[in-house]
Each structure stands twice: as structure tokens, then as C-alpha cells.
Amino acid sequence: MQKYSFVYDIKTKVYFGAEQMIHLGEEVANYGNKVLFLYDGDYIKKNGIYDLVIDASRKYNFEIVEFTSIKPNPRHTDVQAGVDLCKKEHCNVILAVGGGSTIDSAKVISSCALLDAPVWDVVIGKVPTQGSLPLLTISTISATGSEMNTGGVISNLDTKDKQSLRRPSQRPRVTFLNPEYTFTVPKYQTACGTVDILCHAIETYFSDDEPMMLTDTFLEGLIRTVVHYGPIAYKDPQNEEARANLMWSAPWAINDFLRYDKRKTWSMHPFEHELSAFFDITHGLGLAILMPRYLRHVIDEKSLPRFRNLGIYAFDLDRNLEDQEIAEKVIKKIENLCYETFGLESHLSNLGITEEHFEEIAEKLATDHGFYTAGYRKMSKDELIELFNECL
Ligand code: NZQ
Ligand code: ZN
């Protein structure tokens, strides 16, 4: 395959900052006149977003149909209810206000509303999509980057599956990012969101594709930003500088720009999605437990130069140290961030998880993805089970 061949096509128009919210009404009205309005919690009634949407609908003459049934790790059954409502009410545009769970659900609704098929059949690729309704978002938490990318991740609790439906047509047309809306994000979610952004960047950084200095250095800067501002936002939730930096880092970590033509699939995310599917744990928490252990597994001759640059440019480590020492210190810093600064749980067993399903999960990863890891090197099934056991 030809090296360095890719298409840059990231169309989401972003309005950043409190004063940009005045554009909400005109932007929604550009795309339709009957809006499926998804939101996920009472906090949007306290921080003014709800009133803003209602006022905009009066001023710009669009009708609103509210849908509020989405929970974290969104279930396909709730998404199906959203599709049914969208069709019944003949909505022609979707506005999602919330975190990744709400925006992901809105994306899948935007595709399934144009089809006569059960949501899950579409998510698993049994039924092809035929475009999507236009989607606009107001992101309220810095984490998944769903506000600027093409994927919607949905869980099926019956089959214990968590799958992503990615379609270019699902990429939000317009996204509003107002850091002030994230002042109310609880500490636990701030921590999990920060770990998620960090992990998106690290998955891309530790990829075995052709190197690209521009995006590698961008990633180092992004990681530096996230590990600097995550703890500040955690301690001081209303720190605007920290919230703004996290809010702008989140979509760039995963909006496809940094992946340019990288073809290797991620590793920690498929592993974590299986853990969430089986045990319904918070995505960022699962990553916090997996990431340091996974990184220890991929230290080798090939990855050491990457650890070296990451240590020096993102974690301020001394360039005179040996590569191996830098790699260990990078991992230690990630552990300290997750477990000490953020106080996140560091062991799956403390979440009531046992080794019972690890064999099944490892088998499923092979079946669903045809690989055990595609980052720096492949992992055997035994090594993957060993990794899960280390997380206990
Ligand atoms: O329960 P409520 O009150 O609604 O509180 C929400 C929610 O419980 C709260 N929250 C969000 N903004 C808030 C706020 N509380 C107060 N003030 C605010 N401003 O945060 C809680 C978690 O929300 P959720 O949407 O579940 O979190 P997140 O954004 O981390 O999304 C996680 C989901 O996204 C998927 C994950 O797997 C998981 O299902 N992912 C989606 C990706 C994508 N689309 O590209 C990639 C990711 O890697 C990830 O897999
Ligand atoms: Zn993630």
C-alpha cells in the first residue's frame, strides 16, 4: 500500500466560548425545522442550556421534540426508542446536548432514522446505512471527542456487546464548545474524561504505522496539555483556563486529524469496550486500569524511542536518562495521575470483577476484531488474559 496517502475531511464547524452560543438558533434553523432534542441530565436546566435552546426555537421558528432516556454506556434499546420517536415525529435535524453517551446515541439515531431496520442490525453492519440526518451538538464534558468525529458507540446488554458505528455522515455538522458548561462536571467524570483523552492520544502515538513528525509532535503537545490541565480542573472545577484547554484537546485527540493515514487499529479501546460491555464500568475508569499495564507489555526495542520522546516532550523527563528508565517513568507518571491525583480505582477486583469471563472476552476480541492488539505488536490470547489478570 502506498505510504502517506490520505484525505483530510473534517467538516465540523466549531463555535468555541460562551459568547458564541448566540449562533445556536441560526445554525439549527440552517438544517431543519423539527428538532429531535436529546439531553442527558438535569444539569442542563441549571446551567442555562435548556432555556437557550427553547429561546432559540421561538426566535428561529423550529419545533422541538425532547428525548431524555439515554444513560451512560448507552443501550441499543434506548437508542431504538429515540429512532422510533424521531420517525414518528418526522424530525429532520438532531440536537444533542451532553457527553459522549448522548452524542453517540444521537449519531446512531441520525443514521437509523433513515432506515427501516432494527438499530442493532445497523450497528453491527448487517444493514447498510444510507446517510444520516444532520446532527448538531453542545458538548458538556471533555472526554470522548464524539462532538467532532464520526463514531457512535452503543451497548447491547443482551449479547454483552459494545460496538461502534462509524459513518462520515454522522460527523456533527456544528458543535458548540463552551468551557463554562463543564464547570459542573463532577470530579470523578473530570478524571475519567481526562484519562479518556490521554488514552486516545496514546493509542495513536503508539502505533506501528509510518512516522509523521508533524502529528507526533502535535500529539506530544496534546498529551502535555492534558496531563497539565486535568489535575487543575479536578482540583478547581471552575478554572476556565483548564476547562478550555481540556475542551479543545478532547476532539483533536480523536477527530481523525492525528491519525492521518494510520491504518493500525487501537488496542486499549477494544479491550476496554469488552470490559464495559461485560461489567458496565465507566469507560475512562476501565482505561485508567488498563493503560499502565498495557504500556508495560509493549515496552520493547521498537517502542523505546517513542517512550523516550513522549517522556521528554510530554512529561518533562530528563533526556540524559536511559530509554528503559524513561519508559518506566512515563508509565509511573500515568499511574500517579490516575490513582493518586485523581484517586481512581486501580484494580478491577475492587469493582467486583473476577477472572470468570476473561477467557470469553479474549476469544471475543479475536472473533470481533481478528486481532489481540494491533498497536505496537500482536498479543497472543494467553498474553491478553495475563494482562486482564494483572488488572484484577
Ligand atoms: O447522569 P447525568 O446527570 O446526565 O450526568 C452526566 C453523565 O452521567 C455527566 N455530565 C456530563 N456533562 C455534565 C455532567 N454532569 C454535570 N455537568 C455537566 N456539564 O457525566 C456523566 C457521564 O456522561 P457520558 O456521556 O456517559 O460520558 P462520556 O462523555 O465519557 O461518554 C462515554 C461514552 O462514550 C463512549 C464510551 O465508550 C461511553 O459509552 N466513547 C465514544 C467515543 C466516540 N464517539 O468517539 C470514543 C470513546 O473512546 C468512547 O468509547
Ligand atoms: Zn475513549
Image (spheres, grey):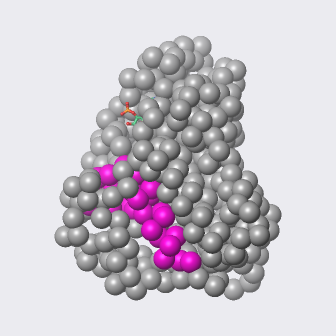
Q: Is residue 46 left or right of residue 136?
A: left
The quarter of the picture where residue 31 lies is top right
Main SS of the magenta segment?
helix
> Is 27 above or below relative to 346?
above
Quarter in which the N terminus is drawn: bottom right
Q: Nearer the viewer, residue 154 or 366?
A: 366
Residue 280 within the magenta-colored segment of the rendering? yes
Q: Nearer the viewer, residue 25 or 307?
A: 307
Q: Nearer the viewer, residue 141 or 100?
A: 141
Ligand 1 image position (quadrant): top left
Residue 81 visible in the shown view: yes
* Residue at figure coordinates x 35%, y 83% from the top left: 381
* Residue at figure coordinates x 55%, y 64% from the top left: 331
What's drawn in magenta, residue-wise?
272-299
Residue 208 percent coordinates (x, y): 63, 78
Q: Nearer the viewer, residue 240 or 210?
A: 240
Q: Is residue 260 left or right of residue 129?
A: right
Residue 32 visible in the shown view: no
* Residue at figure coordinates x 35%, y 70% from the top left: 390
Q: Is residue 70 left or right of residue 208?
A: left
Residue 78 within the magenta-colored segment of the rendering? no
Residue 369 percent coordinates (x, y): 42, 76
